[in-house]
Image: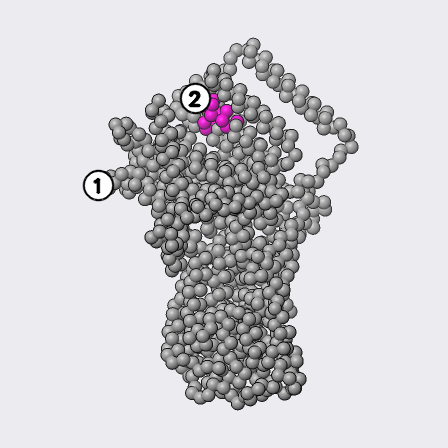
């Protein structure tokens, strides 16, 4: 590894010939590729990163605390603002947790539509990831191509619930809305378009020599270490760990569909890229299956007007595009708001791995690695 | 008097203006080309299809506040943009846009001067341009520009040797360092040198991308990494000088490549008699067309490729391009002796 | 007359910048003055009709070597005070000795050129067979001065290998 070389060279120089002090470089919170308001304090030796200190909290809005003063339906609106590029996934995670707490049965149609929304959301979120990741490495055209396709998904969501970013698209016990007429056809059309566009992205990147040189062997992390750091989602799967909540602890309607969980082999940036590209395809596969087998029936289960879960606490996780998003909710059984609300945010956990990943690499790799772990600061800071 | 002073001064004035207009429209061209690649429209508001955009840009840049950061090295900070711009412009002195033409009863060559070390002059003047970048980054008293300066100097020493080596093999072919002489020797050979020296052409082109700090070698100004690099702290007209110099350098590299490898002002296949009707098109139009092709490729590459990392460029320069370039010189020399 | 005027002007500028190179406190400024100095020397070459030498001067010294100087100056922290030597007057003595040597050399040159016969004209006459600056230098380098030329190349090669060996400890 390059980093070891540097320290080895330093070790056998008893008194350095030149006074090469380390430089502290403040990256962010206003830096074009820290994906929002992330701040990293880099300690550099030349351009090589000796150490990195991640500073978070610039987007902290206190969502967890706020939730303790909102009633159970109002919180859905707050969950939109966490991972704001994948609001439907956060909605789903929260609603399912409350349903688990209340032991509510969700109708099959609602579970199907939730799955479709979630997978569309995954495609949209991955589009954003691909665009910004490629942009960080300098491939500016992929950025606009990916946003072009993301736009189609946002249009679908707009037609479904009227919003393009913060959907508020789920309710405890089911869904607020059924799918509009003709929507299923449009979703199928989108899947076909997306399939061909994926090939386009891959033409630009997957076998591009510069892309390979920039991503291969950059930020290598093996399975056990990734688990030890608490990485999750595609970032973990890139290191060859086949953990996917959709498969391991199926929720919504995932147990009824046939899909694969792609995993990487070397655990470098390129593998994480390949894993996410393959997840695009698997998501489309799930959407198609769900659209074909969409059952008829109600979209809301038997839920009282006033939601008041019994006293108790529960934890439930779903697979968001960023990784495993878990909700811990405690209810005292008396009030109409949670007693304690806590989120295990995948972006936050993945961000923990960043200092380990960037150590020994160059400044140019830092931006590649921030892109490669796919974080959203709204979720990191909450 | 007229021949030694008035005409050269006129030519210089016309050329400088033409270059500056070309540069500002090259910026528009870049925005348009990249927009079309990315299924966008590009500038559309100022004038029909944005054709007046360069004027709007110029007005904006000139009226912006010109900030010198606190604790910057004031003199070097001011001099740096000039040090980038001047070499980019004076290189045009030796570029032949066409042979001698009859104008108002006088025979006027379409180049400012033809010195017998033209090629060396270009290489040496172009190598001075990097000072502006290095010193601009250093004088800003800011960390990102400083890193960018280091990258720029590392980049310069990595590719310049290889590029100069390709020129050596080209000079072996042409037998002269004069730019006009090189074009004439292509005419006499009836062959563009790109067909005789494809390897040298490829290396020169890659080196040209690196020299102009264009993608995929735009590490010194990588927005995503160094937030703009050496010009992070520059604003207003001083920033504009950096900006214009980059595009002027693109035109320089394209016209040098045209002269050296694509036969300068010669028509395609100068050796084929059957295509003589192509000579009806004035020579300088051929020159401009070929330069334009190069410029388009520059833009096309920028829209397509990701960015290299600077250690990878250094590896590419030292371990791939220089050995190939030296091998090419040897092969050319041997071939020249044997044939 | 005009030529002499330009020459003395250039010479004064060159000397002025040379003094600035060693007198300025800021290392980067000092390197900058050195660049200007090299460019002025290149102009001197142009005046003497040695365009090739001028271009090489700009390319190699101003464009190449000084960039490396700058690279090093920016990388290395030079704010550290120089180490004090045991003998505080060592530098003064060394400087005086060097200045004396240069003075002796200059005097020797002046005496030689004013009393001795004019500069041997053999070389230009020989090179006069070919036209052009580059060709003349080429002819001279590969005929009269072939051995010095080769020795210089070998010296450079040795320097290069030495630098690589020093920089890369394990090969």
Residue drawn at (64%, 36%) of the image: C26
Q: Please determine whether, in this image, residue C125 is positioned above or below residue C68.
A: above
The answer to whether residue C2 is magenta is no
Q: Position of residue A352 (x, y in %)?
A: 63, 65
Residue B11 on image: x %, y %? 36, 32
Q: Quadrant of residue A268?
A: bottom right
In-front residue for pair A108/C53: A108
Q: Give the left or right position of residue B274, taking residue B140 as reference.
A: left
Q: Is residue C72 left or right of residue B251?
A: right
Q: Is residue A231 left or right of residue B118?
A: right
Residue under circle 2? C127
The residue indicated by pointer 1 is B277
Residue numbers of the magenta segment: C41-53
In-front residue for pair A110/C132? A110
Helix or strand or loop: what does disc 2 sit on?
Answer: helix
Residue at point 54% right, 31% down? Answer: C36
């Amino acid at each position: 590894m390059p980093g070891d070389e540097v320290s080895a060279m330093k070790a056998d120089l008893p008194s350095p010939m030149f006074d090469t002090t380390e430089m502290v470089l403040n990256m962010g919170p206003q830096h074009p590729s820290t994906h929002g308001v992330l701040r990293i304090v880099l300690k550099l030796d030349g351009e090589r990163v000796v150490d990195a200190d991640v500073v978070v909290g610039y987007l902290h809005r206190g969502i967890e605390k706020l939730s303790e003063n909102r009633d159970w339906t109002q919180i859905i609106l707050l969950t939109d603002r966490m991972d704001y590029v994948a609001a439907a996934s956060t909605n789903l995670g929260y609603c399912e947790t409350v349903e688990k707490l209340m032991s509510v049965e969700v109708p099959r149609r609602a579970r199907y539509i939730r799955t479709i929304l979630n997978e569309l959301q995954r495609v949209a979120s991955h589009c954003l990831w691909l665009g910004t990741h490629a942009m960080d490495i300098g491939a500016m055209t992929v950025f606009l191509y990916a946003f072009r396709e993301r736009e189609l998904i946002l249009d679908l969501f707009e037609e479904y619930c009227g919003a393009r970013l913060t959907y508020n698209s789920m309710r405890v016990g089911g869904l607020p809305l059924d799918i509009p007429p003709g929507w299923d056809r449009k979703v199928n059309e989108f899947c076909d378009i997306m399939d061909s566009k994926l090939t386009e992205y891959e033409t630009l990147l997957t076998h591009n020599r510069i892309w390979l040189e920039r991503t291969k062997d950059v930020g290598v992390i093996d399975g056990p270490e990734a688990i030890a750091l608490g990485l999750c989602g595609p970032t973990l799967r890139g290191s060859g760990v086949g953990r996917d909540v959709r498969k391991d602890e199926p929720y919504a309607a995932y147990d009824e569909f046939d899909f694969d969980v792609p995993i990487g082999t070397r655990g470098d940036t390129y593998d994480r890229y390949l894993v996410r590209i393959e997840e695009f395809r698997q998501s489309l596969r799930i959407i198609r299956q769900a659209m074909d087998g969409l059952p008829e029936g109600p979209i809301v289960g038997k839920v009282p007007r006033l939601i008041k879960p019994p006293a108790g606490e529960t934890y439930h996780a779903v697979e968001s595009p960023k990784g495993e998003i878990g909700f811990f909710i405690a209810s005292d059984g008396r009030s109409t708001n949670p007693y304690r609300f806590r989120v295990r945010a995948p972006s936050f956990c993945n961000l923990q791995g960043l200092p380990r990943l960037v150590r020994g690499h160059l400044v140019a790799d830092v931006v590649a690695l921030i892109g490669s772990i796919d974080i959203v600061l709204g979720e990191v800071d909450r | 008097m007229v021949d030694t002073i008035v005409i050269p001064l006129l030519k210089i004035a016309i050329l400088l203006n033409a270059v500056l207009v070309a540069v500002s429209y090259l910026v528009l061209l870049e925005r348009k080309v990249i927009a079309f690649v990315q299924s966008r429209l590009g500038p559309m508001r100022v004038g029909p299809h944005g054709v007046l955009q360069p004027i709007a840009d110029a007005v904006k840049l000139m009226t912006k506040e010109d900030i010198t950061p606190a604790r910057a090295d004031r003199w070097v900070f001011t001099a740096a943009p000039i040090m980038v711009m001047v070499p980019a412009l004076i290189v045009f002195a030796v570029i032949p846009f066409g042979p001698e033409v009859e104008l108002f009863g006088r025979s006027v060559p379409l180049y400012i001067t033809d010195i017998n070390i033209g090629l060396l002059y270009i290489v040496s003047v172009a190598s001075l341009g990097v000072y502006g970048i290095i010193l601009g980054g250093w004088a800003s008293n800011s960390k990102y520009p400083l890193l960018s300066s280091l990258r720029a100097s590392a980049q310069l020493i990595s590719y310049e040797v290889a590029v100069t080596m390709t020129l050596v093999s080209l000079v072996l072919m042409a037998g002269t360092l004069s730019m006009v002489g090189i074009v004439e020797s292509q005419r006499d050979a009836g062959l563009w040198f790109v067909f005789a020296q494809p390897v040298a052409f490829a290396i020169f082109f890659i080196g040209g991308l690196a020299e102009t700090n264009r993608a995929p070698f735009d590490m010194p100004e990588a927005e995503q990494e160094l937030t703009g690099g050496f010009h992070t702290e520059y604003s207003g007209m001083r920033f504009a000088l950096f900006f214009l110099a980059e595009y002027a350098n693109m035109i320089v590299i394209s016209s040098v490549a045209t002269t050296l490898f694509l036969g300068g002002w010669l028509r395609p296949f100068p050796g084929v008699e059957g295509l003589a009707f192509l000579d009806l098109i004035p020579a300088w139009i051929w020159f401009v067309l070929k330069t334009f092709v190069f410029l388009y490729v520059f833009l096309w590459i920028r829209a397509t490729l990701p960015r290299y990392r600077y250690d990878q460029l250094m590896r590419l320069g030292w371990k791939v391009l220089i050995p190939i370039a030296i091998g090419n010189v040897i092969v050319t020399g041997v071939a020249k002796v044997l044939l | 007359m005009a030529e002499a005027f330009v020459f003395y002007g250039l010479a004064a500028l060159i000397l002025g910048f040379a003094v600035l190179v060693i007198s300025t406190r800021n290392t980067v400024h000092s390197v900058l003055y050195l660049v200007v100095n090299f460019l002025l020397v290149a102009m001197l070459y142009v005046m003497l009709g040695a365009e090739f030498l001028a271009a090489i001067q700009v390319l190699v010294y101003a464009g190449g070597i000084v960039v490396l100087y700058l690279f090093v100056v920016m990388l290395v922290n030079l704010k550290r005070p120089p180490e004090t030597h045991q003998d505080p007057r060592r530098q003064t003595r060394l400087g005086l000795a060097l200045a004396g040597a240069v003075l002796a050399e200059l005097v020797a040159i002046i005496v030689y050129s004013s009393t001795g016969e004019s500069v041997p004209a053999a070389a230009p006459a020989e090179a006069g067979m070919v036209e052009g600056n580059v060709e003349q230098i080429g002819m001279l380098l590969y005929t009269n001065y072939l051995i010095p030329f080769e020795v210089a190349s070998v010296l450079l090669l040795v320097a290069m290998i030495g630098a690589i060996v020093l920089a890369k400890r394990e090969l």
